[in-house]
Image: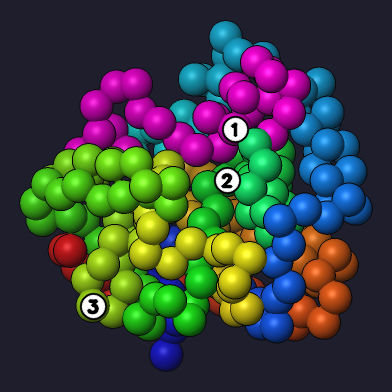
Amino acid sequence: MSLVYGLPEVPAVYSVCRDLEVRALRADVLFEVRSIAERVKSSAHAPTLGTDPIISKYRALAGKSGGRPPIAVYPEVLVRGVLLRGRLPRYNSVLDIVNAVSALTRIPISPVDVDRAVLPLKLAYSARGAVVRDFGGRGVYVRRGAIVLEDGVGRIVYVFPYKSTDVAPVTTATKNAAFIGYGAPGVPLSLVESSVRMVVTYIESFVRGASCSRLEVDGGSRCGRA
């Protein structure tokens, strides 16, 4: 049985990492994230991000499923932040790795604390509008028809392709987490897989004692409406 169920148009690629030690700050992670930010900065240009061959695919799908222009795609937000401020946002040692990889590859990736969510998780189309809270406590309006990742009791864990909610974020208290990459029509599945694999490789390199499962892919074996 899958831990995460995708949609035919949004396949989910994921790995679960256990025995995490999430720190507010790690010097080696900070150094690596800064290095990745420099790579992002040297390869991106703000005026053309909207037509980026990967970001544009997520924008198009989000626009069809309840969004309004301009569509917020989290990797694009991260890249624009790097171009504007010269750095990626800082949260904790694990979230910073995820954000760096997402900015580099342009693939939306969400980390989920699997001990706080009710499993399994599934992608679905929201049947009605709702307001959720992001992990910073800010309200986020979810439109009817928007693609969301919900847990086993219907709570929205992630709003595709932009925002994690306050249901099961990765914090310094997290011990076990799923790292989920999301596809879109026209986005090579191999790119989503390599992005999640990069996150897992960094986790196992920087987080002592962490053990991550092999990558799993679900392309819509179970889907529905939220």
Going from N to C along the chain, the mark reached first, 3 or 2, is 2
Q: Is 41 positioned to the left or the right of 1 in the image?
A: right
Instruction: Check disc 2 and report the residue beneath it.
Output: 107
Q: Amino acid at mark 2?
A: Ile
Q: Would you say residue 194 is visible in this rendering?
A: no
Contact between marks 1 and 2 (CB within 8 A): the answer is no
Q: Quote the CA–CA distance across marks 1 and 2.
A: 11 Å
Residue 153's mark? 3
Residue 21 marker: none
Q: In the rendered view, would you say 171 is above or below 218?
A: above
Which sits earlier in the primary sequence, circle 3 or circle 1? 1
Question: Horizontal and vertical percent for residue 8?
Answer: 34, 61
Q: Is residue 116 above or below residue 101?
A: below
Q: Determine if the magenta segment contains residue 84.
A: yes
Residue position marked by numbered label 1 in the rendering: 78
114 sits left or right of 48 in the view? left
Categorize mark 3 by other alpha carbons within 10 Å: few (<14), some (14-19), many (20+): few
Disc 1 crowd rating (10 Å Cα; few below 14, some 14-19, many 20+) is: many
Going 83% across and 36% down the picture, which residue do you hit? 34
Amino acid type for the residue under numbered disc 1: Leu
Q: Is residue 18 magenta?
A: no
Depth check: 190 or 159 in front? 159
Give the residue displayed 65% in from the left and 15% down from the top: 84
Q: Which residues are magenta?
A: 62-88
The picture places residue 66, in percent across and down from the top left corner, at 20, 39
Residue 185: where, in percent of width, then height? 42, 46
